[in-house]
Amino acid sequence: MRFMNMRANVVCILLWALTAGASAQDSPIIRREARLVLVPVLVTGKDGLLPEPLTAKDFVLTDDGAAMSLHLEDRSSQPLAVLIVMQTGGRASRQFRNYRNLETMLDYMAGSADHSFGLLTFDSKPEGMLRFSHDVSKLHDAIASPEPGDHGAAILDAVNIGIDLLAALPPATRKVILLLSQPQDTASKTPVDTVLRRMSENNVEIYSLTFSPEKTELMDSLKGDRYVNPPYKLSPLVPPVLYTLDLGKPLGMAFRALQENAASEMASLSGGEYLRFDDKAELEKQMAILANHLPNRYMLSFQPASDKEGLHRIEVRIPARPELTVHARNAYWSSASTPSASTPTHLP
């Protein structure tokens, strides 16, 4: 079923979210304007397990090669908003039966955090949506029995609308998109650089769970390490380029890589995760991984020293613990129109 008219209800949800944010304030605040970049970081040991807690002093973060002064955000009381962005077009209908227990998996993934869930479906364009609710069961009918869409998969358009919905929530909210889709975008009209910029400016984390629309050699080649993208072949005459998101390479290459596998690249650029599934058992396994990783990510923040517009390359390391593996976003977007982050300071 098409459960909401898209255009009219985007406005409704934005107004609802703004109203909810205003009513949540229980004391007067003064807002100190500060340009802040947030970097979600997952740290694992050689066995894939999470190590003992780390502090901000353990991390070194560079912004275009320059070391930044870091702060480790306290996320213990931070509310979590998860927007499920679900493809219904193309061959997505073959996966609908695997989503029947998704409601339970989502509740498990959110853990003990104060959380809310929303839903946005899409085919060749964003189609239906359900507003954020603390009760995940309200998504049941839309997830369990969605109406198949057309032939398209406009991933970038859907994520762009999703960013709008999350951006309207209170600033302190942790904003997450759970993308259920094929890897490649088709039919989107939103420019790649617009999505990269808005994803970065609004500190939206994207966790992509993708299915193969067909079993081809190309798709099989994407089954490598989920944190590192496959080699990118520019031409038969030159060797393949490794690590397509090495932003020391031309920016255009990053754009082309995102068009090749939008789901993977957006997850990597946002500091989220990219996982694959082909059946219900694999989906449940990957959701369990996210349930473990999502609440255990560190959130580093820093104020950039450079006013350079465009894509900045960042690198996060733990020099004193070389046995640990760090998974973090490797870029953020800065522009002259980037809104400042509002840091609330409560009056006594």
Image (cartoon, rainbow, N blue to C red):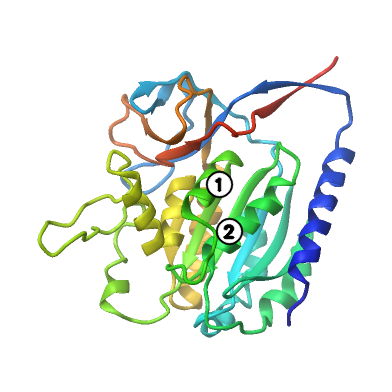
Residue drawn at (58%, 39%) of the image: 201
Amino acid at circle 2:
Val
Dot 2 and dot 1 residues touching (CB under 8 Å): yes
Mark number, residue 34: none
- According to the picture, the residue beneath numbered tag 2 turns out to be 159
Residue 64 placed where, x, y %? Answer: 36, 28
Kindly report the distance in space between the C-alpha atoms of the residues bearing marks 2 and 1: 9 Å
Q: Is residue 35 visible to the viewer in this orientation of the structure?
A: yes
Q: Nearer the viewer, residue 300 or 198?
A: 198
Q: Is 249 displayed left or right of 38 in the figure?
A: left
Residue drawn at (53%, 51%) of the image: 195
Residue lying at the far left in this picture: please name it: 237
- According to the picture, the residue beneath numbered tag 1 turns out to be 199
- For disc 2, the neighbor class at 10 Å (few under 14, some 14 to 19, many from 20) is many
Name which quarter of the figure residue 247 lies in. top left
Name which quarter of the figure residue 21 lies in. top right
Residue 166 placed where, x, y %? Answer: 68, 50
Residue 60 placed where, x, y %? Answer: 39, 25
- For disc 1, the neighbor class at 10 Å (few under 14, some 14 to 19, many from 20) is many
Residue lying at the far top in this picture: please name it: 348
Q: Is 174 displayed left or right of 69 in the figure?
A: right
Q: Nearer the viewer, residue 177 or 35?
A: 35
Q: Does dot 1 land on a helix, a strand or a loop?
A: helix
Quadrant containing the C terminus in the rendered view: top right
Figure check: 214 above or below 313:
below
Name which quarter of the figure residue 58 lies in. top left
Figure check: 219 above or below 28:
below
Residue 29 placed where, x, y %? Answer: 83, 23
Figure check: 284 above or below 1:
above
Q: Is residue 112 visible to the viewer in this orientation of the structure?
A: no
